[in-house]
């Protein structure tokens, strides 16, 4: 199915992740009870209808987890896109969907009873520039929402909490490649500040309540289902419509682009990590690509020539992002193996299929599918924290 990360891959593009011999793991996603009954391990994935979250849901279902996804279809981008993202999981016997705001007072009751072994917390207001426009909204969801989820974890005895953090926490740090051992992180956007705060909150809960907390700093994730506000997706749209793409500066800014399939493997490895109680990991590709190289790869993937429109460099733009991934390699067995050409071709394939999906938006596909939906299909319950944007 378009958008899924499963299926065969070109030789050498995605070898199985190497697992470090010293790495302790939680075991398979099921256990046998004393009476010999199979107990499925349960995981809560917030932001499960989003770009990365929906891939995580696919992977965990395939691995045999019992998955509950929470999402409020935040209007940052098209709801139809998010519905299409979760379409492959709809009807899966081990999948439940909860249409709710992670800040909602009644989130616990909406999620019904049951113990989650782990939480993968991806729900957030994403993006640096939108956070400058709406700092209060980002604070409410990214910090307030994380606090609410950690509290839920405490109440329900959850042992493992995996947080989506961001390379943005490194700000304009000139010490490349960026390392987790660098604690000098003066934030330069409200978004970055919310991720630093979420990491710190995790430390508090880990210290006080013994919840294992792993913060994963993602670096410009791309691939099928990529968010429409991100450069690769925007450029692809302009190219297909025959419109020029805007290059700020000379095109020499560099990014550590990370294929979503590699990030999902890193998240899966973090879910199984069973050593120390609090860690921060960079999940990047460990290499950088400049903007013009990225555009050239995009052109090859789409078989189209991009029209470039140059604009002056934007003040505040970081020149280079570059992850040191030694720690994740050593402790998680993380091995990002996908080339940019491979990832872009997967993105291009999805992009074409997605255009067709958009013409036929599939509203509320869970109706009659057998998938259990917890919350009513109206707007999610109001948030517990005041929204300064209102
Ligand atoms: N994509 C990247 O390059 C990147 C880089 C660094 C960090 N991240 C982080 O990874 C996570 C996932 O990012 P993504 O790119 O998949 O973004 P996304 O916007 O596609 O996914 C986030 C999902 O969270 C949901 N959501 C937002 N607010 C919510 C709320 N209050 N309650 C419930 N659901 C809510 C949205 O509807 C969306 O489906 C985010 O935490 C983001 O900050 C992403």
Image (spheres, rainbow, N blue to C red):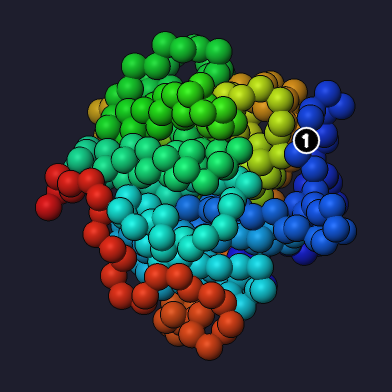
Q: Which is nearer the eye, 380 or 221?
A: 380
Few, some or many residues within 10 Å of mark 1 (<14, 14–19, 20+): some
Give the labeled residue for mark 1.
25
Looking at the image, residue 48 lies above or below residue 80: above
- Whole-percent x, y for residue 366 in the image: 51, 80
Indicate left or right for 103 with 283 as reference.
left
Q: Which is nearer the eye, 302 or 136?
A: 136
Q: Residue at x 83, y 35 (%)?
A: 18
Looking at the image, residue 190 lies above or below residue 182: below
Indicate left or right for 166 with 262 as reference.
left
Answer yes or no: is residue 128 visible.
no
Q: Residue at x 52, y 46 (%)?
A: 156
Q: Which is nearer the eye, 19 or 207?
A: 207
Indicate left or right for 272 with 259 as reference.
right
Secondary structure under the numbered disc 1 in the rendered image? loop
- Whole-percent x, y for residue 246 in the image: 34, 47
Q: Residue at x 57, y 84 (%)?
A: 369
- Whole-percent x, y for residue 26 in the image: 75, 39
Answer yes or no: is residue 118 visible.
yes
Q: Quadrant of the N terminus?
A: bottom right
- Whole-percent x, y for residue 387 in the image: 18, 48
């Amino acid at each position: 199915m378009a958008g899924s990360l499963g299926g065969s891959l070109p030789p050498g593009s995605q070898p199985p992740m190497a697992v470090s011999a010293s790495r302790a793991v939680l075991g398979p996603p099921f256990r046998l009870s004393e009476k010999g009954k199979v107990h499925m391990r349960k995981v809560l994935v917030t932001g499960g209808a989003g770009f990365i979250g929906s891939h995580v849901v696919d992977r965990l279902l395939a691995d045999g987890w019992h998955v509950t996804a929470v999402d409020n279809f935040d209007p940052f981008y098209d709801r139809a896109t998010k519905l299409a993202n979760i379409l492959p999981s709809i009807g899966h016997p081990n999948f439940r969907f909860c249409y709710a705001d992670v800040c909602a007072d009644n989130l616990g009751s909406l999620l019904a009873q049951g113990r989650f072994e782990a939480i993968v917390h991806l729900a957030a207001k994403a993006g640096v520039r939108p956070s400058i426009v709406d700092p209060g909204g980002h604070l409410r969801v990214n910090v307030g929402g994380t606090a609410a989820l950690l509290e839920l974890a405490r109440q329900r005895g959850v042992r493992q909490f995996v947080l989506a953090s961001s390379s943005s926490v490194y700000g304009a740090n000139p010490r490349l490649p960026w390392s987790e051992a660098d604690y000098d992180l003066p934030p330069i956007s409200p978004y970055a500040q919310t991720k630093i705060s979420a990491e710190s909150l995790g430390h508090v809960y880990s210290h006080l309540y013994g919840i294992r907390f792993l913060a994963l700093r993602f670096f410009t994730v791309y691939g099928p289902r990529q968010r429409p506000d991100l450069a690769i997706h925007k450029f692809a749209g302009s190219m297909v419509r025959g419109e020029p793409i805007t290059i700020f500066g000379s095109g020499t800014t560099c990014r550590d682009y990370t294929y979503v399939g590699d990030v999902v493997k890193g998240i899966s490895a973090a879910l199984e990590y069973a050593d120390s109680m609090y860690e921060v990991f960079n999940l990047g590709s460990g290499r950088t690509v400049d903007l013009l190289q990225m555009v050239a790869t995009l052109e090859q993937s789409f078989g189209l020539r991009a029209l470039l429109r140059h604009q002056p460099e934007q003040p505040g733009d970081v020149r280079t992002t570059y992850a040191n991934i030694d720690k994740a390699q050593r402790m998680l067995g993380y091995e990002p193996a996908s080339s940019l050409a491979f990832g872009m071709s997967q993105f291009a394939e999805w992009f074409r299929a997605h255009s067709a999906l958009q013409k036929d938006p599939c509203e509320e596909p869970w109706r009659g599918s057998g998938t259990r939906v917890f919350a009513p299909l109206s707007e999610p319950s109001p948030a517990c924290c005041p929204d300064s944007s209102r």
